[in-house]
Amino acid sequence: MHVSTFLPVFSGFYCNPYYDTTSDEENELQHINDLRAKKKLPLLDNCESLEFDYKTYFKEIGEHCCSYLERELNDFVESITFERIQSPREYNFSNDEIHCVIIPKMDKIRSYLSEHDEDFEAFIHEKCTSCSGFVSFYPNDHKKWLLYLDNDKVYEDATILGTILKFIAKNEGIEEENLSDYEAHVICSNFEQLITS
């Protein structure tokens, strides 16, 4: 069975140094101005007239992150397939998410959580304990999370599998820094227009 959930480890594009496109934008502007100078066209002062294809860039990063985590978590998942990028309307309380379809290896996940019981307990307690400014919708008792696996609630609530895989990734030293080991560049979609007029 598969679960549609968020991709663990990925924390979003907004204000994330791993996916900063500033240097791509500046390089593209410089390249366009070099070509404009050769044609004796006036130089552009900034990137305002450049149209960047962020949608394709984010999708490419999302697909890469899914493939990377599928390889790194292959003991615990059959597959991780990219679905879409979900961006919030405003970035006040949340960030972008990569939505994906995961086919889990439930027996391997159960076994891992059993072997790392104390670490899982600490992780769930830290992530799911309500405090000032945060109300958790999930129990902070890891034993209840283990019951979710036994009664297949993991297939009904996407957050459960995503959170459990987030714990496994963290416990195995798989960090977001590793996801960004990929050469993707944001492209100027009106490049041709800018070098001719």
Image (tube, rainbow, N blue to C red):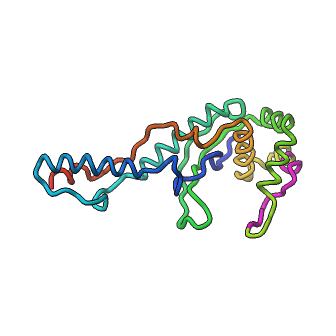
Task: Write the start and end of the magenta stretch as one range.
Answer: 134-146
Image: 117 above or below 40:
above
Which quarter shows the C terminus?
bottom left
Image: 55 above or below 107:
below
In percent of width and height, residue 142 lies at: 86, 49
Residue at 84 percent across and 37 percent down: it is 116
Residue at 52 percent across and 57 percent down: it is 14
Left or right for 175, reference 149: left
Q: Quadrant of residue 117?
A: top right
- Residue most extreme to the bottom: 133
Q: Quadrant of residue 103?
A: top right
Q: Nearer the viewer, residue 86 or 133?
A: 133
Q: Nearer the viewer, residue 125 or 89?
A: 125
Residue at 19 percent across and 50 percent down: it is 195
Which quarter shows the N terminus?
top right
Residue at 29 percent across and 56 percent down: it is 50
In percent of width and height, residue 122 lies at: 83, 48
In percent of width and height, residue 85 lies at: 53, 52
In percent of width and height, residue 57 lies at: 43, 47
Q: Is residue 165 magenta?
A: no
Left or right for 70, reference 129: left
